Image: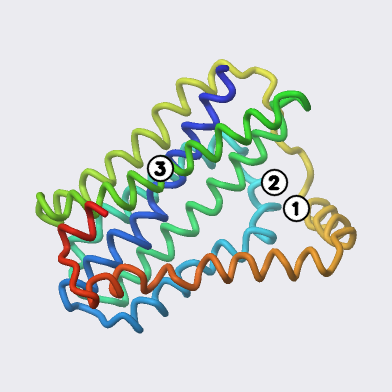
Amino acid sequence: MKKKLLFGILYFGQGIPGAFLASALASHLVLTGQVSRETMAGFLAVILIPWSLKLFLAPLADVFWGYRKWIFTMPLIMAACVLAIPNIGGNMDLLFLAAFLCNMAQAMYDISVDAIAVSVCKEEETSSCQAAMRVGEFLGKFVGGAFMIYLTTILPWEVTCSIAGIVILVSGTLFPWIFLRGIPELHEATAGIREAFKNLLSAAKKIPIPAIFLALCANICMGLPSGSYMPWLAAAGFGEGQVALA
C-alpha cells in the first residue's frame, strides 16, 4: 500500500505542471487576446519536444546524481518556472523558455520516477503500482488543468500561478521525501555514461519498427487537440467561467 501511495503521489506531482501549461496557461493567453490560437498550438507543440527526447535523457538520469536527487530537484525547477510566468508577462520568448525548461524538468522527473518503480516494485506489485500511477497522473492533470482554469475565473492570474507553483512544490518534493525515506531497497544505477548509452542502443535494436511507429502515431494523435480545444470552445460562444466549469 505504501508503494502505491508513493507512486500515486509522484505521478500526481508530475501531472500538474504539464496540464497547467497546456490548459490553464494556453486558455489564459488565448482568451485574453495575447496570442492567436494558431500561435498557441505551435507554442505547445515546441515546448513538448523534451518528452520526445526522453530516450536520450534517460541515460543521463541513470548516471548523474541519482534518481532521488532528480526527483527532489526537478519540482523546484518546475515550480520556479510556473511562479515566474506572471512576472514574464507578454514576453513570448521568455515565456517559451520557462515553459520549455519546465517540460524538460518534468521529463527528467518522469524518467527518474519510472526508474525507481522498476527498482523497487516486485513483479506481483507492478500492475497495482501502474494503476496508482495512472490515477495519480489523472488527478494531477485535473488539478493542474481544469481546477486551475476554474481558479482563473475567481482569482487573479498571478494568484492562480502562485497556487499552482506551491502545489507542484509540495506534491513533488515534500511528500516524496517523506515516503522515499522508508524504501531502503532502492538501488541507483552504477553504469558509466558510455555504458549507459551502449545499453540503450542495444535495447533499442530489440524494439520492432511497427511498435515504434504506432507509439509515435499515438503521441501525435494525443497532442493534436491540445493547442486548440480551449480556444474552439471560446469561439463557440462559451465564456471563460463556463469553460472552466466544464
* Residue 63, label in figure: 2
Name the secondary structure under disc 3: helix
Give the colouring mode of the picture.
Answer: rainbow
Q: Is residue 221 left or right of residue 120?
A: left
Circles 2 and 1 in contact, beta carbons < 8 Å: yes
- Give the quarter of the image for residue 211: bottom right
Q: Percent position (x, y) of residue 97?
A: 37, 69
Q: Is residue 179 above or below residue 232?
A: above
Question: Is 49 in front, or is 177?
Answer: 49
Q: Amino acid at mark 2?
A: Val
Name the secondary structure under disc 2: helix
Q: Say which residue label 1 marks.
A: 193
Question: Is 43 in front, or is 64?
Answer: 43
- Label whose residue precedes the other's in the sequence (3 or 1): 3
Mark 2–mark 1 Cα distance, whole angstroms, equals 6 Å
Residue pictured at 28% horizontal, 46% vertical: 165
Q: Amino acid at mark 3?
A: Gly
Mark 3–mark 1 Cα distance, whole angstroms, equals 33 Å
Q: Percent position (x, y) of residue 122?
A: 75, 24
Residue pictured at 63% horizontal, 65% vertical: 218
Q: Amino acid at mark 1?
A: Ile
Residue pictured at 78% horizontal, 27% vertical: 123
Q: Quadrant of the C terminus?
A: bottom left
